[in-house]
Amino acid sequence: MSFDLASGETLALIGHSGCGKTTTLKMLNRLIEPDEGEVRLGGLNAHDMPAHEWRRRIGFVIQSAGLFPHRTVRENVLVTPRLLGWADARQERKLRELLSMVGLPAETYAERYPAALSGGERQRVGLARALAGEPDIILMDEPFAALDPLTRTGLIDDIARLKSELGFASVLVTHDFAEALRLGDRVAVMDGGRIIQKGAPAELIASPANDTVRDLLAAPRQLAETVGKAFGDQGG
Ligand SMILES: Nc1ncnc2c1ncn2[C@@H]1O[C@H](COP(=O)(O)OP(=O)(O)O)[C@@H](O)[C@H]1O
Ligand SMILES: [Mg+2]
């Protein structure tokens, strides 16, 4: 596969389970080293620097939030700023700014442990943590998968707002085309470890490359129709 990402752009990577979405993100983040090919950011080649240094330039949000359970929200969010050796005052400013941006005021949430948060709150802390080191790119691996629909919509709106305020580029992995549409400037459809089509959402809708793309595009519409029918049957 080959793709690029403009600054501030969001690429939605969509495909059925097992097609290689998580593997792709892990290669971007150097949790997996590719056998061939390269990953570049601006003029830098990922493989010219130590992996831990590369990773600090990239924020990673995983499905289950992946917070350290024995660390407070404050400690979780400030992992990267600490590694970067920021002064205490700068860390504190960043903590307050980010927690307020994700709707979790520091006064209430900073000293809590993950066990005392809801799924949506944990995912918001995961997002704040990914943003804390002021990365150029945010990688999000099905960040909404474990959330109920209302919480999901709230978080999608928050990410859209943060994107326009902070201007980071992002790769959003999802198997839901509706989510891809909400946040993606461009969409890349994966199947069997390859990108089979990429383009603006409207291009994919207008001319899907094959049945796999057509199926992925149809899923949210079918769901809407099924739900509509259920309501219809009840006479509502
Ligand atoms: N560490 C690994 N070693 C070998 N195969 C793996 C590893 N991780 C994932 N895979 C395989 O690679 C394929 C793609 O997995 P993954 O990237 O997790 O898919 P997706 O995120 O799209 O559901 C799957 O067939 C999976 O079993
Ligand atoms: Mg995955």
Image (cartoon, rainbow, N blue to C red):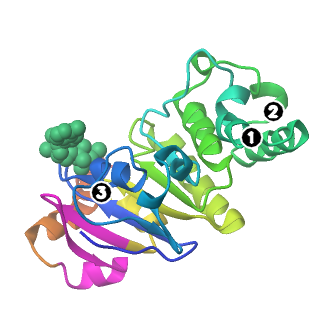
Residue 99 — which label? Answer: 1
- Numbered disc 3: secondary structure: helix
Pointer 1 or 2: first along the chain: 1
Bin the neighbour count of mark 1 within 10 Å (Cα to Cα): few under 14, some 14-19, many 20 and up. many
Could you tell whether 117 is left or right of 165 in the image? left
Q: Which residue is mark 3?
A: 224
CA gap, disc 3 and disc 1: 34 Å
**Amino acid residing under circle 1:** Leu
Residue type at tag 3: Ala
| Disc 2: which residue | 106
Q: Give the mark toward the camera: 2 or 3.
A: 2
Secondary structure state at the residue bearing disc 1: helix
Residue bounds of the magenta highlight:
187-208
Measuring 31% from the left and 48% from the top, which residue is drawn there? 22
Callout 2 amino acid: Ala
Question: Could you tell whether 152 is left or right of 178 in the image?
Answer: right
Say which quarter of the image contains residue 187: bottom left
**Where is residue 222 drawn, in percent x and y?**
22, 58
**Residue at 44% across / 32% down in the picture?**
64
Q: Is residue 234 visible?
A: no
User: Looking at the picture, does residue 63 appear above or below residue 166?
Assistant: above
